[in-house]
Amino acid sequence: MLLENKHVVLAVTGGIAAFKAASITSLLRKQGAEVKCIMTAHATEFITPLTLREISGNPVATSLFGETPEFNVEHISLARWADIVVVAPATANIIGKIANGIADDLVSTVIMATQAPILLVPAMNSNMYANEIVQANLQRLSQYGYLSMEPDSGYLACGIEGKGRMPEPVDIIKEIEFQLSRTTRFTGKKVIVTAGGTREPLDPVRFLGNHSSGRMGFAIAKAAALTGAEVILITGATNLETPRGVSKRIDVTTTREMKDAVDQLYDDCDMVIKAAAVADYRVSCPAKNKIKKTDDRLELKLEKNPDILHSLGERKHKQILVGFAAETTNIVEYGMAKLQKKNLDMLVANDVSVEGAGFRGETNIATLLFADGTQEALPKMDKFELATIIMERAISIWEKRHA
Ligand code: PMT
């Protein structure tokens, strides 16, 4: 869990979205974080400190002049304790106060005193959010390094439709995870990740495809974005959401579309990780209209698709190339052969016939094979955990090559 043992100070200010502070607190704790809530006086009109105390498991501070003796000089001790301060909801008032250096209550004082990153989650009436002063304040705070999330658009508590809704708690948690986990190890580098399965049409309603859900590739894109790299995710059909931090997503259907997308971006990228399950064959002449079931037998003529990774290996200059191999037998032997044939730096071999590995599930079991002939067998683990290890090994190869 990315938030295991992280210290989050959740600063709740006085808007109707304050009631969502309970869900944010609960989700943070489920992800392993410790949460201390602080509230402005106005916030306590919308949700009680008692509720947040019960959900966070910690005392809730509402004033500078300590009803909670557990904290020693509260604003300083909380400011030091925090790995991140999240202001949710952040009203126009607190945004204005911070932007103008005002620290006249516990929340604004903790914000002023902390050296931890501060994430503002604005939520207010859409006219207030659009107000030039609020926008100028947010811009100013961004220049000072404050982080902020865009409000959602939709039905607002004041009865109108517009931009100003607080993002959903799950999205706030994802943003906190991203901000607390990202590094700068691969900042300035470009990484292409392919994910999902390609589909080859038979007719306008049918296709040849495979079982790839896109999970493995999306986990790699998420792990790559956390290294600070610019990540371009090229994916076959999937219903997964683009991971936070991915710079660009390109959706494709067929192998040839995936090849075109990768080829266009290849020359100035630093790393390619090909987790996609690519169709090796396509139907020679897909029917223009739906094929009718008039005959007992239907014969399809297939022709070979280009091998995207093989051609990248031939054109390789500075790039680190990482391939995957979906095997059902002799995974190391077949994997090593693919690594050499496609001129790869690393290959992730997974036995897709084993329970807990390969297609669709949340976990995978892989053996990493390297160009120098070494290998690393990994136990069953969550696909994101595996993705993090793959990124670590791939960046190490890049660093050694450029030392
Ligand atoms: O998406 P999930 O449900 O999470 O499943 C993950 C996965 C099982 C799809 C993934 O872990 C995996 O094994 N991906 C590679 C599947 C595959 O196509 O393996 P392959 O052995 O056929 O291909 C070897 C490598 O060459 C792969 O990196 C593949 O992307 C690439 N390739 C293959 C054929 C082709 N025409 N062009 C290619 O670039």
Image: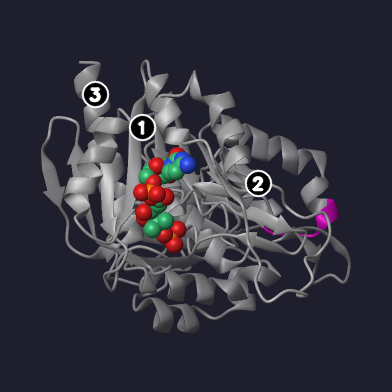
Residues shaded magenta: 123-127
How far apart marks 2 and 1 lie (CA) works out to: 46 Å
Quadrant location of residue 117?
top left
Q: Which mark is residue 257?
A: none
Element type at mark 2? loop
**Residue 377 vertical position relative to residue 312 in the rendered view, above or below:** below
Can residue 111 be seen in this snapshot?
yes
The foreground one among 50 and 211 is: 211
Quadrant location of residue 343?
top left
Q: Position of residue 188 (x, y in %)?
A: 43, 23
Queried on whether the Cβ of the residue with tag 3 lies below 8 angstroms from ligand 1, the answer reads no
From the viewer's perspective, is the residue at label 2 or at label 1 nearer? Answer: 2
At 82% across and 54% down in the image, what residue appears? 288
Q: Are marks 3 and 2 in contact (CB under 8 Å)?
A: no
Element type at mark 3? helix
Q: Residue furthest right?
A: 160
Q: Position of residue 13 (x, y in %)?
A: 59, 63
How far apart marks 3 and 2 lie (CA) works out to: 44 Å
Q: Position of residue 35 (x, y in %)?
A: 37, 67
Q: Which mark is residue 184?
A: 1
User: Upstream in the sequence, badge 3 or badge 1?
Assistant: 1
Indicate the amino acid at tag 2.
Ser
Q: Which residue is mark 3?
A: 399
User: Upstream in the sequence, badge 2 or badge 1?
Assistant: 1
Q: Which residue is mark 2?
A: 284
